[in-house]
Image (cartoon, grey):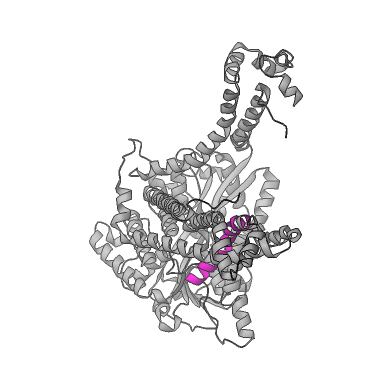
Amino acid sequence: MTESRTSRPGTAGREAAPRYRGWIGQVTRSPLYAGTIGVLAASPRARLVLLVIVPLAWIVTFNIGPIYQMGRISLMQTYPAPDSGAVLTLDNYRLFFREPLYFMPFIRSLIFAALVTVVTLIVVYPVAYYVAKVIRPQNRKRALLLLLVPFWAGEIIRTFSVIMLLANRGALNYLLREVGLIDRPIPMLYTYFSLSFGVVYLIALYMLLPLYSAIEKIPSQLVDAAADLGAGPFERFRRVILPLSKDGIVSGCSLVYLITIGVFTAPLLLGGPNTVIFPEIIAALFHASNDKWPAGSAFSILMLIVSLSTVGLFMKLVGGRSVRLS
Amino acid sequence: MNRTDLTRRSTLMLLGAGAGLVAAPYVIRPARAQSKVVNITTYDKFVPQSFIEQFQKDTGIEVRVRLTDDQGKQYNLLSAEGGAPTTDIVTVTGHRLSQFLKSDLLVPLDVARIGNFGNLAAAYKGAPQLTIDGKVYGVPLLAGFEGLARNTEYTKPTETWGYMFEDEFKGLTSYIISDFLSIVMKYQGNDGDYVTYEGKPEIAQAATDKARDFLIANKDKVRKYYDAGSEVQQMFLNEDIYLAQTWSGPAAKLIMDGHPIALSIPKEGTYGFLYSFNIVKNAPNADAAYIFLNAMLASPEIGAAMTRQSGFNSAFGGVDKLLTDRERAALALPQEQVERIQFFSSVNRQMKNDMIDKATAEIKAA
C-alpha cells in the first residue's frame, strides 16, 4: 500500500520505477508507449476506464456478441450468405406468427415454465426455511452443503438419474412391484410428470439459494413479536415471513423461469411425444436437413424477448419496493 | 479497511493480466492447430478406442473425435464454418453426399495416398454411392438399414410394419420421426425416398401428408421420439418400449450383448445406407487425415472392432471371419429380407429434406 501511494503519477515514485530490460524495456521506453499510456493512465478516472475495458470487452464479445450474431442471422434469407451477399428479410419472424405449428409449442413453453416455477417455489420454500431458521446456526452450512451435493454432478448425469428412477424397470416401479401395489409398471417416464419432476430437480438450486439468503436475514425477534401479539403460525407466515422473503422469491422465481423456458436437455431425455416445447422446435430447426438457421435464430430472438419481458413484468408487479429492515 | 489506490503500474498490470486471460485461448489454439492432429466428426462407437490409442502411439498424431448423431447437424455445422473448417474428416452417408458436394464442403479422395484402399470388401470398392464423375469422395466404413426391432419376450414375430400400430402396443413404440416417415410412406405404397417424385411436388406432398396424418393419428402408440441409437437401446433395456424402428446397428448391438431383441425387415421393405469417412475441403490437417484413413484400413481387426462396437456391418474385407457366431447371427438376415432393402438414393434430396423436415415438425407439434 505504501509503495502504491508513493508511486502515484507526478511523485517521486514514477522516477524510481524500475527500468525493464529486453523487449519490454524497449517498448516501455518508446515515446509512442509513453505518450499513449501516459495519457491513458494519467488520471484515476482514465485508469478506471482502462480496467473496465477488459470485462466490458468480455461481456460484449461473449455475451452480447452471440446474441447480435443470432439477430443478424435471423434477418438473413439463407445462412451462410451466398457470395453475392446476404438478402435481408423479416420472413423468418413472419413464419412464427403464420404457422400455429410453432406458435403452440411456444405458448406451451411459457405455461410450462410458469408452472414449474410455482411448483419449485412451493417445494423449495419449506426446505429453505427449515435450513435458514430451524436448523441450529452452527449446523446450517453443513445442511446447505448436504443439499448441494446432487448439484456437484453434471446436468446430464442428474437427468439420467431421473430416468433410472422413473423408467419401467426403474427404482420406483421396482419398489411398487416389490411391495405388491402394482402388477405392471406404471409408465412414468416420457410424460409431463417426468419432465416436470426432472426440471424441478435440476433447477431447485437456483430457487434454494436466493430463498435461503433472504429468509436467513429475517430477524427471529420479529416472528417472536408477532407470536406475542397473538398471530398464529399462518398469520406469522403471511404477514411477517413472506413479505420479508419477497426479494428471495422474486430472484429465485426469475432465475428458475428464465432457465426453465430455455431448458433443452431435460425435455429431450425426459419428455415424450406430447411434451414438445419451444427449445426443441428451435433445436430441430438448427438440426434440420436443409438450411433453417435463419428461422431458428429468429425464433431464439423471439423467445429471448418474450422471456425477458415476462420476467421484467413479473419483477415490476411482484417485486415492487422491498421491505427493508432498518 | 485499507483503501487501494489505482496507480498507473497496478492499472497496467491488471489490464495486462486481464487481456492476457481473454486472449489466451486465441494464442494457444493456433499453436495447437499446427501440431500433429486429426479432427474427426463421427458417430458414437464408430472409431474403436484401441485403434485410436495405437494410431497415436505409432504416428504421434493426436486423434480428436467429435461426436454427432445426425447428418443434418454435421452439414449445418460444416456450412457455418465456411472456408475455415475445424474438422478434417466427417462421416457422411452415401445418399447425403450430393448435399455436401453441392455446398462444396468435401474434396475427392486421392486414393493413391491410401495404400490400403484395396483392403475394402469387394462389394464396397468403388461403391456407386461414393463415386461421382469417376471421383471417389469417401472411404466406405459401415453399412446398415432401418429395421423393425422388438422385445422377443413381449411380442411375436411379424412380417409387417403395421404391427407398430396395433392397440396392444399403445405407448410402447418408438421411432425417429424423419426416418420412419419414409418407411410409413413405403408401407402405404408410396415412394418414401422421393426418387419418383422429381418434378412432381404435388404428388410428393400428398404422399407425405398421408404418412404424416397416419403418424399423428397413431401418436398414442408412441412412448418417445428418439434421435440417437443409444436412446432406443436404453428404452429397450428399461422395457419402456417393446417395438421400435431402429437403425440396424443399435439393435444388432443389443442382440450381440445377449438381450431379448430381434431385428427384421417387414415385407413392405425398408431403406439402407452406407457410412463413409470423407475429407473436408480446406481440412486443416489433410495429411494427417490421409495417414489416419490408411491406418484404419490396414487390418480387418479394426473393421471387426467397429462392427462389434456399432452393430453395423463393416465395409472392410475379411471382417466376417473374425466375428463370433453370435456376432454373425446378430448381423445376419434371411435372404428374402435382405432383398427388401432399398439403398437411399441421392436423387431429389432437396425436395425430400424440405417435405420431411416440415412433416416432422408437424408431427412433433401435433
Q: Is residue B69 visible?
A: no
Question: Could you say which is closer to the camera, residue A234 or residue A71?
Answer: A234
Q: Residue furthest top?
A: A31
- Across and down, in percent, residue A227 comes to 62, 67
> Is the magenta region chiefly helix, strand or loop?
helix
- Across and down, in percent, residue B274 comes to 47, 59
Question: Could you say which is closer to the camera, residue B238 or residue B13?
Answer: B13
Q: Is residue B256 visible?
A: yes
Q: Residue furthest front?
A: A229
Find residue A127 and report its image quarter: bottom right
- Across and down, in percent, residue B356 comes to 35, 61
Against A216, is B322 above or below? below
State the residue at coordinates (68%, 18%). A23
Question: Could you say which is closer to the camera, residue B86 or residue A217?
Answer: A217
Find residue A276 and report its image quarter: bottom left
> Within the magenta stretch, is there residue A180?
no
Q: Which quarter shows the N terminus of chain A?
A: top right
| A102 relative to B295 in the view: left or right | left
| A315 relative to B53 in the view: left or right | left
> Within the magenta stretch, is there residue A206?
yes
State the residue at coordinates (65%, 54%). B51
Identify the magenta region.
Answer: A187-213
- Across and down, in percent, residue A204 comes to 58, 61
